[in-house]
Image: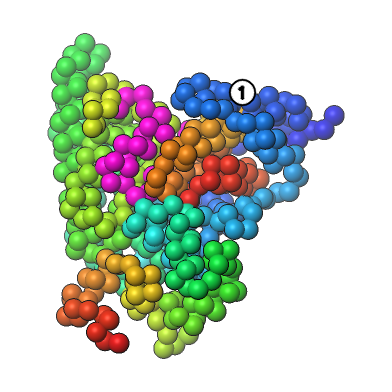
């Protein structure tokens, strides 16, 4: 019987038969479709994915003409994380001139707007110099990271301390207060880097990692920035496929945020003024990659089909069918990359 | 896209799916996505129209290298006395009929009210 080498969601190698892979693909697709209330994959799409796994090539790529634009998160920490001692501007030049980057992103190593606020006077000269030396469009990026606004890292009572005591109203008020602090920081940092340093856009990355109140804060910050600077590029990358209901009742534009899946997250982001949206579909490490990839494609395809703005799916470590491992295997990464771009008609990654 | 493995993640995606950045017209198409919210087909058609090529040509490194050299909008292998960095972006803003934030700020800083008035 034909044995196909694939991997689990944690990257470990496994062997499966073609029939087993097909079952995994169908099960992953149905899981996403049922959760989000969107169509599963068609027979042709399942066959496309099965053929992708049957292909013995180590690396696959998109068809010519289907190339898309790449955006990044925390770009100027990536080379630093590999312990190569070069400056942030040098990293941008490496990405532009050596790594084929379509866009660039200047960031602070502590990738949160709250932390960036403290060093914004040092980030602006970096951006000013970067825009003089580079050609590709450049973002300033960071995470909303609402968790930093509660005790012990911030000024607000920690909702996680209030909830076990049954103080639901107090916990919700704490989330709302944290959101107000976060909105101020995001608008401040975004304004400084755009208006005074020349960034082409602002990237809100890993949005809603702290749940619905964080999503609300990011949407409000986008709305304010878009009103202030209508030409500003704004990318919003998400942290997961499902908005966690940590507050549970908070709304944006009359829509309850808890429980939204990517195709609905997108609609609010679009309305707020986002110009590039990045759905993120988390990997289940104890499931196979075929299961994970099919599942991710169902969520992402529904999002892309509902969108009027470019969709750049998150295909980093542990999202979008890419295994949760520090050294992503090319066989897995290339299949995830090609399949998402081609089946979801993506504008970018 | 994440992790601190530039070959395994960033270089790989660029080879597998990316347009190629300034090796091709990737940076130009990205500008339309970023600042005008245009989807990929529309952005590619817009740039292709401005460059006088087909959308399929935009990711061709050989052709685009020649076009970028002719238009002087910046290339990977820059030679002396050609546009690079902000100079290239001045030209890109004109070419794509697009406002580029840092170009406008540069004009303000040096007192140029309209780049076109220099032509």
Badge 1: few (under 14), some or many (20 or more) residues near its Cα, within 10 Å?
some
Question: Residue placed at 56% from the left, 56% from the top?
Answer: A67
Q: Secondary structure at mark 1?
A: helix
Quadrant of the image occupied by residue A15: top right
Residue A105: where, in percent of width, then height?
Answer: 37, 57
Residue A184, position as x, y percentages in the image: 16, 44
Q: Is residue B102 above or below residue A14?
A: below
**Numbered-mark total:** 1
Which residue is nearer to you in this view: B99 or B50?
Answer: B50
Q: Quadrant of residue A46?
A: top right
Side of A117 where A261 appears, left or right: right
Question: Left of B35 or right of it: where is A120?
Answer: left
Residue B84 coordinates in the image, percent (x, y): 40, 78
Write down the chain letter for disc 1.
Answer: A
Q: Say if the magenta span includes residue A69.
A: no
Q: Which residues are magenta?
A: A257-282
Question: Looking at the image, which residue is at 43% across and 31% down?
Answer: A241
Image-quadrant location for residue A50: top right
Residue where numbered disc 1 is placed: A27
Viewport quadrant of the N terminus of chain A: top right
- Answer whether residue A14 is visible to the viewer in this image: yes
């Amino acid at each position: 019987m034909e044995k196909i080498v694939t991997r689990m969601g944690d990257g470990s190698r496994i062997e499966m038969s073609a029939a087993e892979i097909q079952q995994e693909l169908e099960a992953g697709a149905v899981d996403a479709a049922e959760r989000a209330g969107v169509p599963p994959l068609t027979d042709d799409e399942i066959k496309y994915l099965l053929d992708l796994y049957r292909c013995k090539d180590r690396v696959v790529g998109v068809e010519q003409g289907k190339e898309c634009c790449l955006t990044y998160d925390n770009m100027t920490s990536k080379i630093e994380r590999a312990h190569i001692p070069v400056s942030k501007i040098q990293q941008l030049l490496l990405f532009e001139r050596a790594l084929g980057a379509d866009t660039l992103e200047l960031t602070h190593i502590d990738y949160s707007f709250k932390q960036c606020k403290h060093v914004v006077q040092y980030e602006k000269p970096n951006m000013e110099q970067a825009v003089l030396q580079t050609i590709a469009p450049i973002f300033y990026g960071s995470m909303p990271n609402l968790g930093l606004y509660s005790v012990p890292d911030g000024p607000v009572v920690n909702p996680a301390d209030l909830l076990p005591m049954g103080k639901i109203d107090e916990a919700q008020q704490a989330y709302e207060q944290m959101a107000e602090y976060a909105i101020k920081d995001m608008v401040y940092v975004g304004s400084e880097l755009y208006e005074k340093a020349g960034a082409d856009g602002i990237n809100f990355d890993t949005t809603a990692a702290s749940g619905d109140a964080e999503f609300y804060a990011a949407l409000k910050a986008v709305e304010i920035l878009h009103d202030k600077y209508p030409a500003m590029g704004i990318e919003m990358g998400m942290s997961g496929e499902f908005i966690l209901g940590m507050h549970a009742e908070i709304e944006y534009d009359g829509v309850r945020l808890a429980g939204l899946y990517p195709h609905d997250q997108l609609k609010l982001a679009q309305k707020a003024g986002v110009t590039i949206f990045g759905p993120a579909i988390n990997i289940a490490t104890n499931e196979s990659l075929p299961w994970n990839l099919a599942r991710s494609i169902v969520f992402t395809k529904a999002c892309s089909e509902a969108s009027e703005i470019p969709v750049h799916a998150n295909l980093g470590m542990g999202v979008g069918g890419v295994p949760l491992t520090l050294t992503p295997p090319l066989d897995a990464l290339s299949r995830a990359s090609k399949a998402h771009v081609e089946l979801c008609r993506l504008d970018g990654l | 896209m994440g992790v601190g493995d530039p070959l395994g993640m960033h270089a790989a995606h660029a080879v597998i799916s990316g347009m190629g950045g300034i090796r091709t017209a990737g940076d130009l198409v990205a500008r339309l996505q970023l600042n005008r919210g245009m989807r990929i087909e529309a952005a590619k058609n817009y740039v292709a129209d401005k460059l006088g090529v087909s959308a399929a040509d935009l990711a061709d490194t050989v052709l685009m290298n020649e076009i970028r050299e002719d238009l002087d909008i910046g290339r990977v292998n820059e030679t002396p006395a050609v546009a690079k960095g902000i100079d290239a972006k001045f030209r890109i803003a004109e070419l794509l009929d697009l406002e580029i934030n840092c170009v406008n700020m540069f004009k303000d800083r040096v007192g140029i009210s309209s780049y076109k008035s220099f032509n």
